[in-house]
Amino acid sequence: MPKKKFLYNAFGLNISSEFFLPELSSGRKPVDIKIISKPLSSREVFQKSPHFRDHSFNSKNPNRVFLHWKNEASLLVRDGKEIWVDPDRKGSPKVLRLVLLGAALSIILEQRGYLVLHGSAVASKKGAIAFLGASGEGKSTTVALFHARGYPLLTDNALALDPKKGFQVIPAFPQIKLWPDAARFLKVSLREAPLVEPGSKKRSILKRKSFFKKNAPLRKIYVLKESPKVQIRSLDPRQAFVELLRCSYGIERHSTKKLGASHFTQCARLSSKVPVVLLKRGKKLADLPALIQAVERDLL
């Protein structure tokens, strides 16, 4: 019996998937990407990543990238068109979705020539506003704050840019992941917000009605850093380049010579084309109103 296939859309690409991905919007044919359930026998080729305890990767060929999540799944991302998935029988569907919608799709986008950064973004009348930072630096909370103020959501956590179109922001999918205390502070309902994964208190919040579905020109990039008070400081192109590299999505994969060279070139071009500034912010939720006021003044 043929396996059931779901049609989705993410990052402007139509996806045919044998796995249920409720975070995504509906898609249509023709299909750009296929997500297929397929046994993988190449576990011995996985290299242990120094950046993570529980998964490995192998990217000697940038068009054939293997991923392995311990006790969850093995994947092969190939040619910007397919993701082969070999799930562990005891694995969690929620964790698998995190892997597919995070690491696997980011690799697909890179294989298709996009620049992918660890960031979130909202749309404004004059273009997209992006926030970059490592995990825990407040990207999701910041983008949720702007969304609550009326800015449509473009992406949370994976910022995909099209170098061929002046680094336009590609809309991802209508999900924001928030901790309960941040959601309560922003008055976001958790009634229909499932846990992101087992063992985590973070919630998956869908914003289908307020999701910006078109590419948006990139207006400005704010790099988040912890500080006692809110402060915005300009970065010169060299400093901006360093921050863009630091905030690259899956930077450990860019040791591959071909992919790494392309990624560095894209970051260098972006740092000289779009304003990149440092946004220092406090960790307390009470500091959020001062943050949005500072950014809105900076954008005037």
Image (spheres, rainbow, N blue to C red):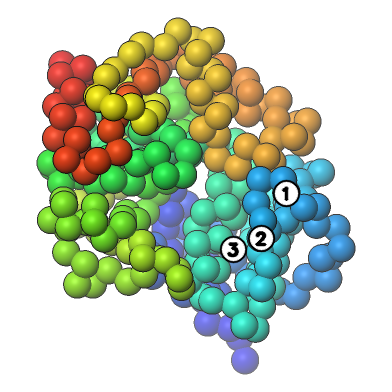
In which quadrant of the rendered view does residue 142 lie? top left
Q: Quadrant of the N terminus?
A: bottom right
Please tell me which residue is depicted at 51% across the width and 75% down the height of the picture. 93
* Spatial CA span between label 2 and label 3: 26 Å
Viewer-proximal residue among 267 and 168: 267
Please tell me which residue is depicted at 28% across the width and 27% down the height of the picture. 228
Please tell me whether residue 223 is drawn above or below residue 48 in the rendered image.
above
Say whether marks 1 and 2 touch (CB < 8 Å).
Answer: no
- Which residue is denoted by mark 2 in the rendering? 54
Please tell me whether residue 260 is drawn above or below residue 185 in the rendered image.
above
- The percent position of residue 266, horizontal first and vertical second, equals 57, 23
- Going by the numbered disc 2, the residue's amino acid type is Asp
The mark that comes first in sequence, 2 or 3, is 3
Instruction: Identify the disc placed on residue 34.
Output: 3
Secondary structure under the numbered disc 3 in the rendered image: strand
Instruction: Identify the disc placed on residue 49.
Output: 1
Q: Which residue in the rendered view is the most extreme toward the bottom? A: 1
Tell me, yes or no, if residue 294 can be seen here.
yes
Please tell me which residue is depicted at 40% across the width and 39% down the height of the picture. 137
- The nearer-to-camera label among 3 and 1 is 1
Q: Give the side of residue 195 with respect to residue 135, left or right.
A: left
Q: Give the side of residue 2 with respect to residue 168, left or right.
A: right
Q: Residues within 10 Å of mark 2 (few under 14, many from 20)?
A: few
The mark that comes first in sequence, 1 or 2, is 1
Q: Give the side of residue 163 with respect to residue 190, left or right.
A: right
Secondary structure under the numbered disc 1 in the rendered image: loop
* Spatial CA span between label 1 and label 2: 9 Å
Q: Residues within 10 Å of mark 1 (few under 14, many from 20)?
A: some
